[in-house]
Amino acid sequence: RDLAHYSSYATAIYGWKVLAMLTGTIYGSDMAALLGKTGLDPVDIVSVRWDSEPHKPAYFLARDHENQSIVLSIRGTITMKDVLTDLFFEEDSALQEEDDYDALLAKMGAGQKATLEDKDNTCPNSVRAHQGMVHSAREIARETRLEVEALLSTNEGYRLVLLGHSMGGGAAAIIGSFWRNVFPRVVVYIFGSPCVSPLNSLPTNSDIVFSVLREGDPFSALSIGHVSDISKQIAMLCEDQTLRNEALSKVQNRNVVDLSSTDLSWCCEQISELRRKYNTRKHYPAGQLYYISGRNNQEKISRVEPEHFGEMLIHKNMTDISRHYFTNYEKVLKRFYDKIEDLEPNPIIFGRKIG
C-alpha cells in the first residue's frame, strides 16, 4: 500500500504542465496538481520549492495525517538545470571535512547540540554516491532538517517518509543515509531508481530504502562504470576481426533459443571472458530492489539483488525512456495494489501487513 500510495506523491511534485502532457489531466496550477494527486489539505503543505537549480531539486514537505507520516518528496530530472545535476556523475563522499555537522545531521531538540560521540555514531562515513545526487541531498538536508525535526516533535508517533522518482529518489536515499540514526522511524521509497552508489556501501545496501524498477527502464543500469565497460567491449570487438566474424557467424539473424548447444556454450564463454577483462567500478540502484517485469496488465513483481543491474544491455528499445516515466510507475503500482485488495482483506507485502 505504501508504494502505491506514495507513488502519487512522487508524481505530484512534477507540476501541472508535465502532468497535463503525460496524463491529459489539467489542474491549472502546480499547487492544484499537488493537492489533487495527494489528496492533502492545503494547510498540510508545509513548504514547497517548484523551481530547481543545479544541485537544488524541486521538493515539497507535507503532513500525511491519514498515514501518520511527515513526507519529503523530491523531484527527478525535468529541466536543463536538473540535467546539469545528473552530469556530475563522478563518485563523492556524503560528508566533507569542512561540513557543519550540526546543520546536516544533529538532532538539537530541547536546545541540545550533538556531542562528539553522537557525531561518531551517526556520521555516515560509508556513504559514497553519485556526486550530483550527493550535493542535492546535502542542500535539501540543510534546508529541511530543522523543519522536519519540528514536525516530528509536534506530531507524536509520526514517521518520516522520504521519496522521489529517478534522480529525486537517489537524493532521498542519500538523505535517508544521513538521517537513519537521527530520525529512527525513517523510510525511503524510490520509483525508477537510478544508479546511486557502489556495492557494499550506503545507500546501495540500505535496509530502510525500498526501490521499484521496471523491466526496460534504461536508467537502472546507467552509470559511468556501465558506459566504460560497454565502450571497451565494443572497441575490442571492433579491433578483433576474427572474434567479430566468428560471433556474427554464430548469432546473426538468430534468436538465442535457435542456437545449438555448441554455439550457445561458445557465446557464454566469450561473454564470461569479456566480463573478466572489463569490470569497472559501477553504481547501482539503492536499497532493497523490487523488479516489475512483463507488460500489458500481465506484470509481476519480484525481489532482485543489485548485481541484476551490473551490465548495460544493448537492444533496439534501449533508448525508450517511456519505461522510466513516473506516471507509468504510479499506474502499475496502483494496479498491483488493487489486485491485492481484491484477493485479501488484510494483505501482507514486503513482510508487513498493510491496509
Image (cartoon, helix red, strand yellow):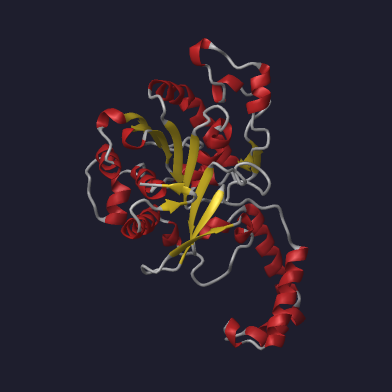
- Residue lying farthest top? 111
Residue located 61% across and 55% down the image: 306
Q: Position of residue 149 (x, y in %)?
A: 46, 23
Q: Position of residue 119 (x, y in %)?
A: 65, 22
Where 330 sits versus 157, above or below? below
Instruction: Residue 77: tell me if it is visible.
Output: no
Where 18 sits versus 252, above or below? above
Q: Image quarter for residue 27?
A: top left
**Between residues 235 and 214, which one lies in front from this camera angle?**
214
**Between residues 23 and 240, which one lies in front from this camera angle?**
23
Left or right of 188: which side holds 98? right
Residue located 70% across and 79% down the image: 267
Q: Position of residue 317 (x, y in %)?
A: 48, 69
Residue located 41% across and 30% down the image: 158
Where 200 sits versus 155, above or below? below
Residue located 66% across and 64% down the image: 230
Instruction: Residue 262: tell me if it is visible.
Output: yes
